[in-house]
Image (spheres, helix red, strand yellow):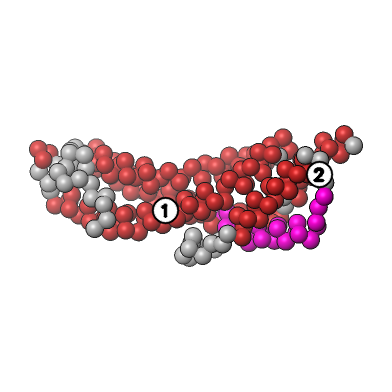
Amino acid sequence: MATKREQLPVRIYNATLGSEEFRDFWRAPAGLGNYPEATSSEPVSALLTLDALAARWLAGDYRADNQAFELLLSTIARGDGGALLAALTLQQEVLARADTVLARRGAAGPLCPGGLVPGEVDVLRTVVRKFFVGEVQPWSAAVDRRRQQLLPPLQALEGRLAAALPPNYATWRRQRDTALAAAGAPRQHVEAILKLLADCPGGPGLAPA
């Protein structure tokens, strides 16, 4: 019995996080389309249920409904973990390039020396309002909301099975978490805009038009 109990976390890992269904969950899509508009609450509910089952099994209650379990895994396989990572990676790449441009301009000297506002400031403010405030920020906020829905039950399950996670999963998890940290890219971009326009009268233009 002790051996069976000791092997239980590994068996749960193999049936859940290490399964083909979870690999499908994290598989990158061919394209993002209108993500995350078309997402469903079903994968989140399935992950919450799966974590609750794992907690019960680890506590010594081994009851299981195989058909219901397979349905949970099937729902998770159709989830959008891969799309979430792809969206955050895209966000990071695009905003990092923009931050580099802003930093390069800032290194060339004050944008508004003596309080004078050159024409390029109006152009920058227009771009900020139209593209960043009008398009990027709303999309980024929606992606971050999805991240906050999907991650807690996943991280809870990983925490329960921490001792059973194989080295290759632990390595991949660190890489994944690095990608997930890109959720902070919009905030960093705002800071870059504020820094560049700090000496310009009229503010940075971050309010919607």
Disc 2 is placed on an element classified as loop
Mark 1 or mark 2, earlier in chain: 2
Q: Which is more toward the observer, 67 or 161? A: 67
Residue 54: quarter of image: top right
**Mark 1 — residue?**
140
Tell me which amino acid carries mark 1: Ser
Q: Is residue 28 magenta?
A: no
Residue 27 visible in the displayed image? no
Q: Residue at x 52, y 50 (%)?
A: 147
Q: Amino acid at mark 2?
A: Asp
Magenta region: which residues? 63-82
Element on which disc 1 rests: helix
Q: Nearer the viewer, residue 156 or 16?
A: 156
Is residue 66 rendered magenta in the image? yes
Is residue 26 depicted above or below 200 in this figure? below
Classify 1 as above or below 148. Answer: above
Instruction: Specify few, some or many for label 2: CA neighbours under 10 Å numbering under 14, 14-19, or 20 or more.
Output: few
| Residue 98: % across, % down | 33, 48
Query: Is label 1 or label 2 in front?
Result: 2
**Can the viewer see residue 42?**
yes
Measured from the top left, where is residue 93 in percent x and y? Answer: 42, 49
Q: Main secondary structure of the magenta part?
A: helix
Q: Is residue 125 left or right of residue 79?
A: left
Residue 52 screen position, x and y as percent: 70, 47
Residue at (73, 38) in percent of width and height: 164
Q: Residue at x 55, y 42 (%)?
A: 177
* Residue 180 in the figure: left or right of residue 162: left
**Image check: 86 left or right of 193?**
right
Q: Which mark is residue 61?
A: 2
Find the distance from the CA under tag 1 to the CA under tag 2: 41 Å
The quadrant in which the N terminus is found is: top right
